[in-house]
């Protein structure tokens, strides 16, 4: 095809987007590394270069390990549930039954609603004299400090993240299920296979790539949780529900310790970039047509 | 036959149960918001249907909190973000799909790389840059809005979505337009853009939802209450009404109405599965 667009048009069209990406992605990206070598804690206007000291401080801090552990616990609990349960729901919904649209709307609703409202709604369920503790006492348990007991706080917040993600991943699975050949299910029915064998032998192998995709997307979003924690626990009690992003936020915007927070941000960057690389080159090649 | 019926019954009971779990937190919030002062909201056993039914909490919270203001602020921010994303993504997607130029591969991978950079990890320098550019609300409301919008004005997701859309258009379309005497800008605006409208719609809807729910960035940059977007305003209810759960519940529900209407009107975009994996905050 002949070049009708001249020499400069491509750059002209790209320019606005590139300017935004440079100013708000690339410069901050490199600056994050830069900031992590400075000490802002004594004076925010006159930072001093301190080399690797923020990292040394970070790797000697017990809170850092606590926060890292919490974040990975978040990931290890939320990701398997979000990779499997929505698939189960998608299989159930992907049948010739009545009310499919209504089920989809209701299960998708938590995805659409603001995370702040969702967190407030759960805070109310978790209240000391709230409805969940009523159920607990009915079951003969003593009331639980869902958000106030260090043993439970993190798990209570994880439940909100899972609850809010189920509909989203269910829809992804539903789209993938459409591509499974129907004849294979018919063959299973003739063989008299039950629900479990049918889906373990036909469905799961077919949608393995989607399961892998859901695993990495949900792992990446688990690494980034913030609002749930900010609204419900502020990372407490005793740091028991503090995760990486919340800790960065706290150190940076409450303690104004920008250097230390940046060192933490670099750790987050490295972890998320590793997951993203797997994701992009492993499962989303088609989407970006690499 | 009996096996079929049992299967159907189990399927429906599981789906009904999960649907109820999905909406129960909201139901309980609505129930609390409709209970008057004479009813104990901590009563055991809990009452879903209010005994002292009233709209007083809604009226009370509406009088004390400027929801209209928050709503307008959210509309400005989400609207601006959507508009910029549509324009910038379409403009950037076009040469990446239809033109040959020096540095194309590099540009492509540079944009792809931004997908891997989580905003949460770079938000600190983003904040410092926004401060330096005077794009925060103490320099005026307009500056504040621009500061809320700019870091999300374009995304790699949007650029790739538009690139994909442009890739699907037959070359003959452009050739015919050129023969008719169009220049490159006319080809873009009059020939190509009308053909990628469905992708623009998808991009608009998902950008809108993402921007509408954004909480971290506005809670970092906003200092003036008159600039609050809905999520920040709703979070603020907790401080304003410390333990008045009737008001907090009423305010939370009020704030959810606009996005609920939007979702129900646009539901096919969300639940059809055609746009799977479109966006996730």
Image (cartoon, coloured by chain):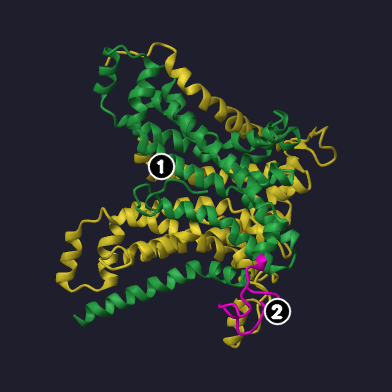
Tell me if B89 is positioned left or right of B237 in this view: left
Label for residue B38?
2
Counting from the top left corner in percent of width and height, residue B131 is at 72, 33
Query: Is residue B232 depicted above or below B27 in this figure?
Result: above
Residue at 63 percent of width and 68 percent of height: B55
Q: Chain of mark 1?
A: B
The correct choice, above or below, for A167 with respect to B232 in the image is below
From this viewpoint, which residue is outermost toward the right?
A42
Q: Quadrant of the N terminus of chain B?
A: bottom left
* Horizontal and vertical percent position of residue A87: 37, 62
Chain part drawn in magenta: B35-57
Disc assigned to residue B170: none
The subunit letter for the residue under badge 2 reads B
Shown in green, the chain is B
Residue B44 in the image: state x and y as whole percent: 63, 84
| Label 2: which secondary element | loop
């Amino acid at each position: 095809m002949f070049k009708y667009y001249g020499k400069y048009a491509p750059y002209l069209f790209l320019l606005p987007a590139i300017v935004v990406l440079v100013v708000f992605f690339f410069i901050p990206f490199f600056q994050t590394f830069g900031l992590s070598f400075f000490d802002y804690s004594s004076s925010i206007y006159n930072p001093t270069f301190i080399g690797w000291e923020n990292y040394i401080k970070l790797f000697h801090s017990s809170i850092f390990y606590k926060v890292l552990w919490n974040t990975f616990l978040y990931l290890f609990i939320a990701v398997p549930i979000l990779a499997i349960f929505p698939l189960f729901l998608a299989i159930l919904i992907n049948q010739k039954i009545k009310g499919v649209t209504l089920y989809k709307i209701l299960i998708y609703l938590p995805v659409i609603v603001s995370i702040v409202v969702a967190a407030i709604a759960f805070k109310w369920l978790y209240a000391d004299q709230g409805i969940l503790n009523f159920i607990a006492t009915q079951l003969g348990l003593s009331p639980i400090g869902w958000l106030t007991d260090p043993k439970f706080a993190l798990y209570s917040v994880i439940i909100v993240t899972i609850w809010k993600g189920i509909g989203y991943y269910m829809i992804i699975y539903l789209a993938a299920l459409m591509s499974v050949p129907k004849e294979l299910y018919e063959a299973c029915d003739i063989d008299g296979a039950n629900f479990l064998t049918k889906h373990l032998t036909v469905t799961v192998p077919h949608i393995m790539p989607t399961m892998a995709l859901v695993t990495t997307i949900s792992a990446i979003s688990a690494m980034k949780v913030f609002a749930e924690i900010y609204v419900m626990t502020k990372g407490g009690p005793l740091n028991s529900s503090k995760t990486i992003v919340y800790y960065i936020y706290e150190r940076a915007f409450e303690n104004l310790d920008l250097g230390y927070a940046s060192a933490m941000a670099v750790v987050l960057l490295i972890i998320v970039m590793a997951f993203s690389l797997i994701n992009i080159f492993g499962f989303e090649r088609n989407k970006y047509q690499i | 036959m009996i096996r079929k019926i049992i299967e159907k019954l189990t399927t429906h009971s599981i789906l009904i149960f999960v649907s109820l779990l999905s909406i129960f937190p909201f139901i309980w919030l609505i129930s609390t918001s409709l209970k008057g002062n004479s009813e104990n909201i901590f009563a055991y056993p809990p009452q879903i249907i209010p005994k002292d039914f009233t709209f007083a909490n809604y009226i009370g919270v509406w009088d004390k909190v400027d929801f209209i203001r928050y709503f307008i602020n959210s509309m400005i921010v989400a609207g601006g973000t959507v508009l910029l994303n549509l324009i910038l993504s379409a403009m950037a997607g076009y040469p990446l799909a239809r033109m040959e130029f020096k540095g194309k591969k590099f540009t492509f991978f540079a944009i792809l790389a931004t997908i891997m950079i989580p905003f949460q990890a770079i938000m600190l320098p983003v904040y410092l840059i926004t401060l330096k550019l005077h794009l925060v609300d103490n320099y005026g409301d307009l500056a504040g809005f621009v500061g809320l919008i700019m870091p999300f004005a374009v995304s790699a997701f949007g650029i790739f979505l538009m690139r994909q859309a442009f890739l699907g258009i037959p070359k003959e379309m452009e050739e015919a337009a050129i023969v008719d005497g169009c220049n490159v800008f006319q080809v873009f605006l009059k020939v190509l853009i009308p053909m990628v409208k469905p992708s623009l719609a998808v991009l608009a809807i998902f950008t809108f939802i993402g921007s509408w729910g954004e909480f971290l960035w506005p809670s970092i940059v906003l200092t003036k209450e008159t600039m609050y977007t809905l999520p920040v305003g709703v979070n603020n209810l907790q401080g304003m009404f410390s333990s008045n759960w009737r008001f907090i519940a009423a305010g939370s529900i009020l704030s959810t109405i606009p996005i609920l209407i939007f979702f129900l009107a646009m539901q096919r975009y969300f639940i059809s599965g055609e746009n799977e994996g479109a966006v996730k905050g």
